[in-house]
Amino acid sequence: MDDILQQIEQEVAVFARRIEGARTRTYGTAQLDRSAYLLLLYLQQNGQCTQGEYAAAFELDTSTVSRQIVPLVEMGLVERKVAPQDKRSSVLQITAQGIEKLQEVRQARRELYEEVLEDWTPSEQGQFLYLLQRFNARLKERAEARAAMRKGRP
Amino acid sequence: MDDILQQIEQEVAVFARRIEGARTRTYGTAQLDRSAYLLLLYLQQNGQCTQGEYAAAFELDTSTVSRQIVPLVEMGLVERKVAPQDKRSSVLQITAQGIEKLQEVRQARRELYEEVLEDWTPSEQGQFLYLLQRFNARLKERAEARAAMRKGRP
DNA sequence: TAAAACAACTTGTATTATACAACTATATTC
DNA sequence: GAATATAGTTGTATAATACAAGTTGTTTTA
């Protein structure tokens, strides 16, 4: 087993499961469910977007996104407005309350990482962050390209 | 936003979603579903184990593991035997056919990583693998400790 | 050592996140 | 202006999971 890509692939598969397990077991569902957290995070970091843009960025079906948004709007964490230039689409934006909630949840989640990464050097932490960011950026491009392609010829 | 742990936490959350999206969109469900892949991987790397051990390692409910195993046994990829020392528990072991199947699936999955990591240096790939392994090992310990605790006082 | 408590697994049921298909309202194209 | 395409919604199905109750086997204890 000396093929590094294959090893990475395996480790990532396990990682994804462990993260998911830690998430549900540690944070409970009380805080904010996975999809809600990611959506708020995305809106805070990328500013407003339409549902379709968000769906493309994560290769989600628009129906899925549509449903994810309802409770967030009801809780007042996200604001949804009809886009003036195209009345079919809605523009999503995080609210002040949403930012506050996000900060709270982030704090709770941070604790797991304090525990798990406590014996990592700052340099290791920095390197891990850097590599994750690169990986994610690449996957995001890929997702968007694939979403665009599906639109082109369905 | 200069808190590195918080940044890692966020990047990991996004990473988990992207990996999951890429998995379902890229490999389809044709190959082998997520739980089956992880179970075979675990059995190949760790040798035989009982269902309870596997559940503890991933903080899964035993009922979940119980169901995951049925199709694998039916497909002949895993063998399940009553444990001689404790007839309540079953010992799981990957079969030759399971190893073969795993190899096939791994090959297909590898392709995504070829694409996404093509411009990473070998050193970056190695570093990423190393950090993921450490992270996973730590989360595994944690999962097992928590499972043991739940048994102690439920 | 028999009864009680406990443990490993299974089965029934509910929940959650997702996709796909059909639909509605609006835009674009010809 | 009619035909086609797009953004989002709603109906329905599936997959992965947890929790609760049940079964069978094991350990503790009075």
Image: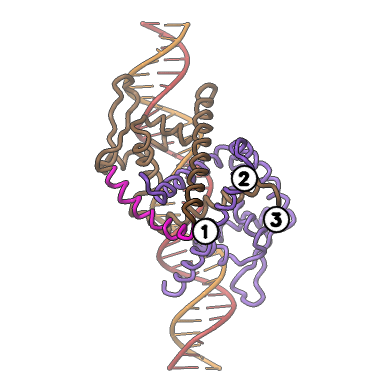
Chain colours: A brown, B purple, C orange, D red
Picture coordinates of residue A29, whole percent (x, y): 37, 54
Residue with the mark numbered 3: B76
Q: Are marks 2 and 1 in contact (CB under 8 Å)?
A: no
Q: Amino acid at mark 2?
A: Ser
- Secondary structure found at label 3: loop
Closer to the camera in the image, B98 or B23 = B23
Mark found first going from the N terminus, 2 or 3 = 3
Picture coordinates of residue B22, whole percent (x, y): 54, 39
Could you confirm whether marks 2 and 3 are on the same chain? yes
Q: Quadrant of residue A62?
A: top left
Q: Residues within 10 Å of mark 1 (few under 14, many from 20)?
A: few
Q: Are marks 1 and 3 in contact (CB under 8 Å)?
A: no
Which quarter of the image is occupied by the C terminus of chain B?
A: bottom left
Closer to the camera in the image, A94 or B5 = B5
Residue lying farthest right?
B96
Residue with the mark numbered 1: B64
Q: Quadrant of residue B65?
A: bottom right
Q: CA distance from mark 2 to mark 3?
A: 39 Å
- Secondary structure found at label 2: helix
Picture coordinates of residue A124, whole percent (x, y): 51, 52
Q: Main secondary structure of the magenta part?
A: helix
Closer to the camera in the image, A145 or B27 = A145
Picture coordinates of residue A12, whole percent (x, y): 56, 49
Mark found first going from the N terminus, 1 or 3 = 1
> Which dot marks residue B123?
2
- Image-based side of A137 in relation to A93, left or right: right
Viewer-nearest of discs 2 and 3: 2
Q: Residues within 10 Å of mark 2 (few under 14, many from 20)?
A: few
> Which dot marks residue B21?
none
Viewer-nearest of discs 2 and 1: 2
Q: CA distance from mark 2 to mark 1?
A: 38 Å
Magenta-span inclusion, residue A107: yes
